[in-house]
Amino acid sequence: MSEITRQVIKRPAALLLAALFFMFALLSGCSKQPQIVSHQGPTMGTSFTVKWVSSDADIDAKLPAQIDQLLVQVNNSMSTYQKDSELSRINRMPAGEVATLSEGLTQVLKKALEISDSSGGAFDVTVGPLVNLWGFGPDGRVIHAPEEQEIAQLRQRVGYHYLRLTGNQLNRERKVYIDLSAIAKGYGVDKVAELLESNGITAYLVEIGGELRARGLKPDNSHWKIAIEAPVSGERKVQRIIEVKDVGIATSGDYRNYFEENGIRFSHTIDPSTGKPISHKLASVTVLASDCATADALATAMMVLGPERAETYAEQQGVEALLIIKSADGFIEKMTPGFKHYLVE
């Protein structure tokens, strides 16, 4: 054995310990404590905000572009405002011609038809022509309420039962117009949540146009807090605050998008059974479900059903809901028993 080798073997153990300590300190300095990272922007004619808890700078750097690309893909598939979207092309096809749908559009339409069935048609993705007639669709605002004859004529082109979905094959038995605006934002939220989870993110809050999905806890181990608006026009006022995790959240109401004529308010929520805006006392519905697409569609269905039927429907569907109902003195609340557990008093 050479002299050089013997000298290396005889080096003090303290030198090795010092090297290990230096490496540990270096690695500790490279890691960071979990923190909330945020990304926001425009999508689907509204805005989005995504917050996630992370300690990985590489993931934080790449996620914003992936989120943006994903939301563009959803919009390219399901927009009715975008003339070259997948859905717009399908709506231009003649009745009886079978369309092959993308995976995403198949998933959304399948869920939409299930909720249409369970709600007795209160949720109907073919109500688009009536939405447009009342000035709440891509054709723009109207200056007065339509005539009864116009409503009756267009109702002949409305009915989810004219849609036949077999696997990814869609047959429209009549030339009905499909509008997914009451479920597409919720689906977009769910897809962003899936993207985050595929990158190892287990705590996040995703929001598109007021529809949300939350998972996990914030870095301080507190829940995500969500403000539910009071259904009053012209101002922003909080009705309730809830603490959530592992849930999809959607609110539907008649207090933001409407027009008035001769002292009568016409809501953007159209009842497919009448062809007219809803006229009952239910002002707002907030739904908590396992995913945001379901919560989004159920909230719309309940707004159409009205306060009494909506409460029963929520219980039948196994979801939690808060109903805010107009009264002579302002508003009264009704909620499912489980919703109370989310309230911040």
Image (cartoon, helix red, strand yellow):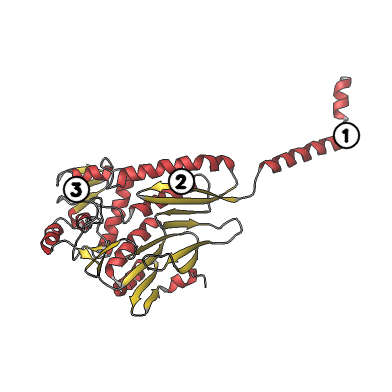
Q: Is residue 67 above or below residue 266?
A: above
Rendered location of residue 246, percent (x, y): 48, 59
| Label drawn at residue 312 | none
Q: Quadrant of residue 150?
A: bottom left
- Residue drawn where x is 17% and y is 54% of the image: 162
**Which numbered disc, 1 or 2, marks the residue that appears first in the sequence?**
1
**Which numbered disc, 1 or 3, marks the residue that appears first in the sequence?**
1
Rendered location of residue 336, percent (x, y): 40, 73
Q: Work out which residue is located at the far bottom of the displayed protein and give it.
A: 329
| Label drawn at residue 12 | 1
Between 335 and 240, the residue placed more toward the observer is: 240
Distance of label 1 from label 3 (alpha carbons): 80 Å
Of discs 1 and 2, which sits in the foreground? 2
- Residue drawn where x is 46% and y is 51% of the image: 49
**Mark 3 is on which residue type?**
Asn
Of discs 2 and 3, which sits in the foreground? 2
